[in-house]
C-alpha cells in the first residue's frame, strides 16, 4: 500500500512520540499543504528540511539538494560477499554431511553454476547433478525433496562458515560505515529479507564489532512489525479495510496470471524464460522493511539510499521511489541494472564512498 489518508493514520492505537509519527508520514509519498521546518539530527551540524503533512497533495520538492541523508545497507552481497566467501564451502559441508562423496564444488565449478543458474540454488543443484549423475538410490519423484535437504544442510553449515575468521567482510565496508557515522548520517542494516535468514545475517553483522554496532540500527522482522508502517500494513495496529483486502487479492491474481501467460508462451516457443516470480507478500515485506528503515532513521524515503546486493531489494526500492546503488558481488557480476542510480564494484577509492553519495543529486 503506497499511500494512506490522515484519517486512517489517526486510527493507529500505538504508543509513540511525535518524532516517530512525523517520520512515518515522510515515508508516504503523497502528502500535501506541506510546511518546511529545519531541525538537527542528534545535535550534529546537519540541517534537515522536513515536510509536515496536513492533507493529500504532493509535497513540493526543494530546488536545492538536501543535506539530509540516511544509508540503508543489505547484508548479503553488501557487508559480505556470501556467495564468494562462504556459500561454496557450506555446500561442500552439506554434501559431506549427506554422504555425497562424489560431490565437491571447486571455485571454477561453483562460479560456473552460479552464473548459469542466476544464483538460484535449486537450479544450481539440478545443473550439477544432471552433469555428473544423480545418486543411484534416489527415486526420480524425490529429487525435489533431495534438493531441499541439501539446501537445508547448506544453511545449517553456512552459519559456522560465516563465523570463521577466514570469512571476511567486504573490503572497505567498515570505513564506509565509520565515515557515515562520523558525519552524523544514520546507518541502517536490513536483515528482514536476506535469502539465508536473520540468524546468519546477524552473524555477519557481528563482525562489525560491538562499538560500531551500537551506533547503527538493525532492522529485522520484529522492528518492521513495531514500526508504524508495519502496524498499518500487517494489521497489528489497525484492521485492514475492505478496499485493502480487495487490492491485495487483485495483486495476487495479477501475479498468478502473469506467471501463467509467460509459461504458456515459453512452452509454445519451446524456450526457457526467466520471469519475476516474487509473490505480492514478499514484495510487501521488502517494501515494509525499507519504509521501516527510513522511519527508524527519521529520514524521508526519498532521502534514503539503499545499498543493494539483491534484485529483490532493487524491486522494493523502485516500488517506493527510494534511490539505490547496486554493489556488485560474485552473484551479480554480469547482471545489468539500467535503471539503477549507480552501479559500483565495491567500497572506497574509485567506488562507493560517503562523499560520492553526498555529491549525488538524489532528489
Image (cartoon, helix red, strand yellow):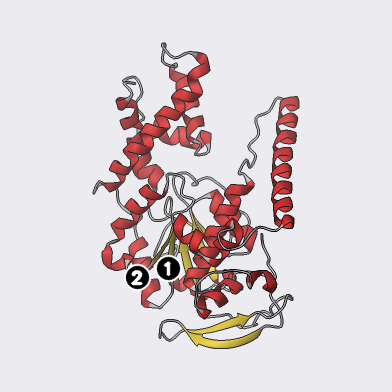
Sequence order check: which comes first, mark 2 or mark 1? 1
Please name whichever residue, 170 or 296, is drawn nearer the observer in this view of the structure.
296
Q: Viewed as shown, does residue 202 lie left or right of 73?
A: left
Q: Image quadrant for the C terminus?
A: bottom right
Residue position marked by numbered label 1 in the rendering:
187
How far across and how far down the image is residue 346, in percent?
Answer: 42, 57
Residue at 62 percent across and 58 percent down: it is 318
How far across and how far down the image is residue 302, in percent?
Answer: 59, 70
Q: Identify the secondary structure beneath mark 1.
A: strand
Furthest residue in direction left, as rendered: 165
Residue 157 quadrant: top left
Residue at 76 percent across and 25 percent down: it is 268
How far across and how far down the image is residue 79, in percent?
Answer: 39, 56
Q: Is residue 118 above or below residue 30?
A: above
Please name whichever residue, 115 or 54, is drawn nearer the observer in this view of the structure.
54
Q: Image quadrant for the N terminus?
A: bottom right
Residue 52 visible somewhere in the drawing? yes
Residue position marked by numbered label 2 in the rendering:
215
How far across and how far down the image is residue 288, in percent?
Answer: 56, 59
Q: Identify the secondary structure beneath mark 2.
A: loop
Q: Is residue 116 above or below residue 7?
A: above
Residue at 43 percent across and 51 percent down: it is 77
Query: Residue 122 — which label?
Result: none
Q: CB under 8 Å between callouts 2 and 1?
A: yes
Q: Viewed as shown, does residue 3 lie left or right of 237?
A: right
Q: Is residue 233 above or below residue 215?
A: above
Between the residue at mark 2 and the residue at mark 1, the CA separation in whole angstroms equals: 8 Å
Q: Is residue 146 above or below residue 258?
A: above
Residue 362 visible somewhere in the drawing? no
Please name whichever residue, 229 or 329, is drawn nearer the observer in this view of the structure.
229
Amino acid at each position: 500500500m503506497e499511500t494512506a489518508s490522515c484519517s486512517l493514520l489517526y486510527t493507529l492505537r500505538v504508543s509513540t512520540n511525535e518524532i516517530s509519527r512525523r517520520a512515518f508520514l515522510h515515508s508516504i509519498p503523497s502528502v500535501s499543504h506541506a510546511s518546511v521546518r529545519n531541525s538537527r539530527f542528534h545535535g550534529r551540524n546537519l540541517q534537515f528540511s522536513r515536510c509536515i503533512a496536513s492533507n493529500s497533495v504532493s509535497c513540493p520538492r526543494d530546488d536545492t539538494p538536501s543535506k539530509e541523508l540516511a544509508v540503508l545497507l543489505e547484508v548479503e552481497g553488501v557487508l559480505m560477499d556470501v556467495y564468494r566467501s562462504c556459500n561454496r564451502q557450506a555446500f561442500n559441508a552439506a554434501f559431506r554431511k549427506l554422504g555425497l562423496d562424489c560431490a565437491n564444488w571447486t571455485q571454477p565449478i561453483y562460479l560456473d553454476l552460479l552464473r548459469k543458474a542466476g544464483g538460484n540454488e535449486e537450479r544450481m543443484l539440478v545443473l550439477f547433478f544432471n552433469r555428473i549423475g544423480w545418486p543411484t538410490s534416489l527415486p526420480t519423484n524425490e529429487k525435489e525433496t533431495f534438493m531441499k535437504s541439501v539446501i537445508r544442510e547448506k544453511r545449517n553449515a553456512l552459519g559456522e562458515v560465516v563465523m570463521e575468521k577466514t570469512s571476511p567482510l567486504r573490503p572497505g565496508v567498515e570505513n564506509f560505515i565509520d565515515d557515515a557515522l562520523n558525519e552524523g548520517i544514520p546507518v541502517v542494516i536490513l536483515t528482514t529479507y536476506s535469502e539465508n535468514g536473520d540468524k546468519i545475517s546477524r552473524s555477519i553483522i557481528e563482525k562489525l564489532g560491538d562499538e560500531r554496532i551500537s551506533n547503527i540500527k538493525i532492522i529485522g522482522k520484529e522492528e518492521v512489525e513495531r514500526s508504524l508502517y508495519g502496524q498499518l500494513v500487517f494489521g497489528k495496529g489497525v484492521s485492514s479495510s475492505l478496499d485493502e483486502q480487495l487490492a491485495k487479492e487483485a495483486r495476487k491474481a495479477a501475479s498468478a496470471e502473469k506467471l501463467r501467460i509467460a509459461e504458456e508462451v515459453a512452452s509454445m516457443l519451446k524456450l526457457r524464460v526467466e520471469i519475476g516470480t516474487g509473490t505480492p507478500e514478499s514484495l510487501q515485506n521488502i517494501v515494509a522493511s525499507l519504509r521501516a528503515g527510513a522511519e527508524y532513521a527519521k529520514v524521508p524515503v526519498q532521502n534514503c539510499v539503499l545499498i543493494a546486493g539483491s534484485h529483490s531489494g532493487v524491486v522494493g526500492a523502485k516500488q517506493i521511489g527510494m534511490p539505490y546503488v547496486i554493489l556488485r558481488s560474485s552473484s551479480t557480476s554480469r547482471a545489468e541494472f539500467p535503471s539503477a542510480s549507480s552501479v559500483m564494484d565495491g567500497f572506497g577509492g574509485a567506488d562507493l564512498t560517503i562523499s560520492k553519495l553526498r555529491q549525488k543529486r538524489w532528489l
